Image (cartoon, coloured by chain):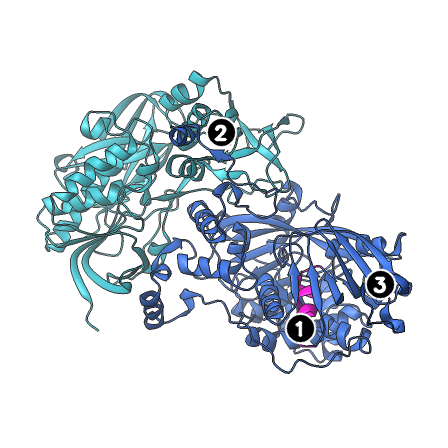
Chain colours: A cyan, B blue
Amino acid sequence: MTVEKHDIVIIGGGSAGIAAAISAYNNGCKDILLLEKDAELGGILLQCIHNGFGLHRFGEELAGPAYAEKWTNMLKDTSVKVKLNTTVIHLHKDKTLTYVNPVEGYVTISAKAIVLALGCRERSRGAIATPGYRPSGVWTAGTAQKYLNMQGYMVGRRIFILGSGDIGLIMARRMVLEGAEVLGVAEIMPYSNGLPRNIKQCLDDFDIPLYLSHTVTDIRGKDRLNGITVSRVDDDLNPISGTEMDFDVDTLLMSVGLIPDTALLTEAGISLHPKTKGAVVDEHMMTDVPGIFSCGNGLHVHDLVDFVSMEGEEAGLAAAKYAAGNLSGSRGVKVSAGEGISYVLPSYISPQDMEETLEIKLRVKKNARDVKLALRQGDKLIKELKKLRVAPSEMEKLKVTKAELKDVTGELSISLEN
Amino acid sequence: MYDIVIIGAGITGSFIAHKLSKRQCKVLVIDKEADVANEASMANSAIVHAGYDPKPGTLKAKLNVIGNRMYPDICNELGVQYVKSSAFVVATDASESRILDTLKTQAADRDIECRDITGDEARELEPNLSAKVIRALEFPTTGIIYPWLVAIALMEEAVLNGVELRLSEEVLSIDRISQESAHKSSPDSCDSASEGYRIHTDKGSYECRYVINAAGVYADDIYGMALGHKPEFSITPKRGEYYVLDEMEHPVVSRVIYPVPGPAGKGVLVVPTIHNNILLGPNSHIADDKEANNNTADALSYVKESVKKTVDNIPFDKVIRCFAGLRPSGDTGDFIIEESKELKGFVNVACIDSPGLASAPAIAEYVTDEVMKEQFDYDRKTTYIHGKPITYMGALSDEDKNRIIADNPDYGEIVCRCCLVSKGEIIDAIRRPVGATTVKAVKKRVGPGLGRCQGGFCEPLVVDILAKELGIDKTEVRYDSKDSIILMEMTKSVNKKEEA
C-alpha cells in the first residue's frame, strides 16, 4: 500500500490550525492538508457567540463565529485542502498519521511537517474530585455553552459556577440573559482566573457575587442536582469548617481550568511540559520530534484567540520552512521560569536559527504591581520589561531580537523582579 | 403467570436470568434502575478475586473459588473481555507477613495457584511497588472485567431467549397468593405447588410461582414486603469510594495490588482496568442510607493516603473521576442464599457483598442446581439463540473497520474523542436487545464519557443521537433515572423564533 505524502498536514481546524495553514501557504508551501474533526471549521469559536475577538489581530471586535469566518474566508483564497468530519487516531514519530472519516474510513498518510493545533479540553468535576453525589446537572461551562449556543437548550434555571475562568464568567452572563438565575461564582484562589473585563462585564454588571477563596464542598441530588455547599478555604486551599453556605441550585457549571489535548502527542513520543501540559517546543514551535510543530491552546492555554491565531501563524511559517528544508531544527539554549514565573514558552531558543524577533510568552504566579520581567543569562541582564500590573490570568509577552541574543551561550531565565 | 420473577438486574440477577433462560420456564426480571447492573454491580473494584481470603467454611469461600474458575469461559462465550491480570497481596512488616502465611495455607487448601515471593522479586515485576513491601503472594488467576458489560451481555442473551425484562420499575409490595386465588388466575394449575406470589410495582402487578430476591442493598426490604414483618437478616450499606485515573500507556501497576486483608475487608487497592485506567479504592464506611452513594472528602483523602502504603509514584494529577458504591453487607458476614424458611418458593440471594462479583456465576448455579434443584427442574430449551457481542471498532483491523464504514459511514464518524467511539457504535448500543435508553447506559456499553473529558465534548452529541433513535425530544433524554433531567427547555430566543 502506498502512503499518500503531503508537505504539511495540519491537525485541527480551529483558530490555530486555520492560521497555521494560511501562514504556511503564504510562506511558499502549496501542498497542505488540514484535518478537522467537526463538520465545519472554526473549532470552539463557533460556540463563542459573545463579542471580543479580533481586537489585536484585526483591530475590530467580533463575535466568535464572525472571527472564524474571517479566517475561513482567507483560507478559501489558498489551495489548502480541507477534510472535515475527520478525526486523527494515530500519530507517529516518523510523521505518519492515521485519520478516519465517514467517506474514506481509516487512512494512513505521511507528511514532511505536521502542525498540531489540537485545542484544549476543560477540567471536569471528576478531575478536581469534588465530593458529593454525581447527579445530572453538573457540567463544564463549555458543555453548557454548546447546549445553549449550538443547540438552543438551557441546562438549568438556577445556576452556580465553580471557577472564575473566562468561559464560566461568560456563561454566567449568557445564562442570565436567557432568563436563568446565577446565584454566584466561587473561586478557590484569592484572585480571579478570568480577564478583568469579563469580571466587570459578566459578573459586576449583573450583580452576580464572586466568592474568592471559596470552593464547592458538597453536591446534593441523587438524580438531578438540587443543591450545593460552598466553603471558604484557608491559605493551603483546604475548606474551613464552619464557613459552609448552602445554595439551592439545579445546575453547577465548572470553569476550573483548561488543559491542552495531548493524547496524540504521547503516542508520538513528544515530550510534555510539566506546567503547560502541552508539548515542549523551541522558538519555532517545534516539538522534540523534528518536523512536528504545536501551537494554540493545544500547546498552552491562551486568554485571547488573537494570540492563538498569531501563534498558529508562527507555527505555519516554521512548518513551511521545515518542509522546504530551510530549518535546521538544532536545539538552542534552555529558557526556564525563574522567580515568580509559572512558565515560559518556548523552552528552547537558538539565537542562530531564530527569526529576527521572537515573543517569549509567560505567565506570572501571582498578581503584582510595579514589577519588571527580566531575561537573564546567569546574572547578566539581557532584556527587561516594566509592568504596572501583572496577573496569572493574563499571558505576558517579552519581545527579544536576534541581535539581543547573539552573545547568548547558556541557559536563559526569566523572573519577576521589583 | 410467570414461573419465576427475579427482583434485581445486577450481576447476580443477570447470571440467574441467563441460567434460567436455557430452561423451559417463564421468567421476568424487574429492576427499579434504568439499566442492568446500575448500582453495586456498576460501582465496585471490577475484580474477579482468586478466592484465597474468605473465611473457611463460608459460602463466600466456596462460591468465589468456583466463580473465578467459571469466568474466563463465560466471558469468552459472551464475547466480553476478561483479562487474567494476576494480583499481589503485599506485606510491609512481620505481622502482615503472618497474614500472608494464612492466605497461603487457605490458597493451598482451595487449590488456588499462589506464588510466594520477596519484596524485591515483586518490585522486579511491579517497579512502582513501595520499597516498604517485604513479601508478596502472587495470585495469577485474579481477573479484571467490566462487570456491567458481563451483566448486560448475560441479560441480552436471556432476553433473546424469552426472559422478560422490566427496567425503571420499582417493586412496592408482594402478596402471597393463596391456593384459592391462584386457581382463579390460573385454572390449569391446581396441584399443591400452585401457591405463589403477586408482585406489585409502580407500573403493574405480576404473578409468579417463585421469587428470586436479588435486590442488592434492598434485599432485606423486599423480603420484608413478602414476609409482612422484619426479616431475620438485615443489610447495612457499606460505602466504598474510588478514584479513577486516566488511561495511560504505562499504568502505574499492571496487576491488582492488595494490602493484607483486615477486619474491614480487602483494604484499599490499586487496580488496573482493561483499558489501562487505574482504580484506587475502596474505603469502607457505613452509609447513612441505601441511596447514599456520595463521595466524601474524608474517604477520598483516606484512599489517597492508603494506596501510598503499597504503591509509589501514583499520578494523582491523572484523576478523571471519583465514584462510590454501596456494598450490600449482611449481618452474618456471609452470603445468604437460600429458600426462605417461612415462605416457600421465595429465594433470597442476599448480602452479596465482596466477593459477590467474583462469585456471581457460581451463585447462579448454586441457586438453580442446588438450592432450587427440584423446583427449577424444567426441561432444557431445544434451541438457544446466542447474543451477538458488541462490535468495538477499536478492536478491529483497519481492513475490517473500512469494510464496516463502507457499509455504514456512521462507523467512521467519531463522537467520543477520548475513547474514540463512533456514531455507529452508539446507535448500535441503543438498538441492541437490552438497548441503552440513557446517556449512562450508552456510556456503559460503548464508552463515550468514560474518558478524560468525562463527556464534556461528547454528551451533547450522545443526547442528540439518543433523542433521534428513541424518537423523543431532547428534553426527554435522561442521564440515568427518570428524574435525572439533562436539558430543561429550549432557550427564549429559539422559542420565540418558533412562535413567530
Percent from the top left, x then y, of residue A80? 15, 50
Name above or below for residue A173 compared with residue B164. above
**Label at residue A212:** none
Characterize the magenta stretch by its predominant secondary structure.
helix
The magenta-colored residue range is B8-23
CA gap, disc 1 and disc 3: 27 Å
Name above or below for residue B438 compared with residue A162. below
CA gap, disc 2 and disc 1: 58 Å
The subunit carrying tag 3 is B
**Label at residue B184:** 3
In the rendered image, residue B20 lying in the magenta stretch gets the answer yes
Mark 1–mark 3 contact, CB under 8 Å? no
- The residue where tag 1 is placed is B21
Q: What element carries label 3?
A: helix
Percent from the top left, x then y, of residue A128? 52, 41
Where does the C terminus of chain A fall, quadrant-wise? top left
Which marked residue is nearer to the observer: mark 2 or mark 1?
Answer: 1
Q: Residue at x 33, y 53 (%)?
A: A271
